[in-house]
Image (cartoon, rainbow, N blue to C red):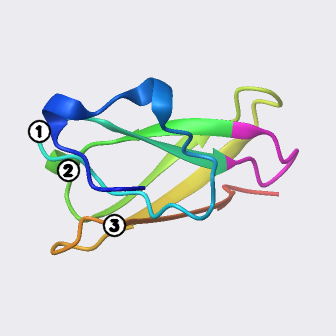
Amino acid sequence: MPDHDEDDFNEDEWNPFEEDQPLKAREGALTPAPWHCARCGEANETMIDLYSGYSQEYVEDCAVCCRPNLITVAIDPESLVIALRNELEYE
């Protein structure tokens, strides 16, 4: 994803599911981040908040199959690039 100032950020032009764009956290605002359910593979979205820290772990249910996914987020403090992975919370 190209660098955007908060003032010129246009969510209509940005597709978080495009893999060739590194996802960067926005300071002072929530950042939508995509993930695919570890059970059914359907696309989901979570909101990253820098106020929660550069390393986060939480559970979100898939919007389609309702299975709980453990979401692990790591944010580079300098570049603010987000690395997100998920797995089923339990089998």
Q: Is mark 2 in CB contact (under 8 Å) with mark 1?
A: yes
How far is the residue under mark 3 from the one under mark 1?
Answer: 15 Å
Mark before the other along the chain sequence, 3 or 1: 1
Tell me which corner region of the image, top left, top right, bottom left or bottom right, holds residue 24: bottom left
Which amino acid type is shown beneath numbered disc 3?
Answer: Val
Mark sitting on residue 81: 3
Residue appearing at x 88%, y 44% in the figure: 40
How far is the residue under mark 2 from the one under mark 1?
Answer: 7 Å
* Residue 50: x %, y % from top left: 20, 50
Establish if 34 lies above or below 62: below
Magenta residues span 36-43
Residue appearing at x 80%, y 27% in the figure: 64
Q: Is residue 80 rendered magenta in the image? A: no
Residue tagged by mark 2?
50
Mark sitting on residue 28: 1
Residue appearing at x 11%, y 39% in the figure: 28
Mark sitting on residue 89: none
Q: Please, what secondary structure does the residue beneath circle 1 have? A: loop
In the image: residue 75, left or right of residue 33: left
- Mark 3 against mark 2, which lies toward the viewer? 3
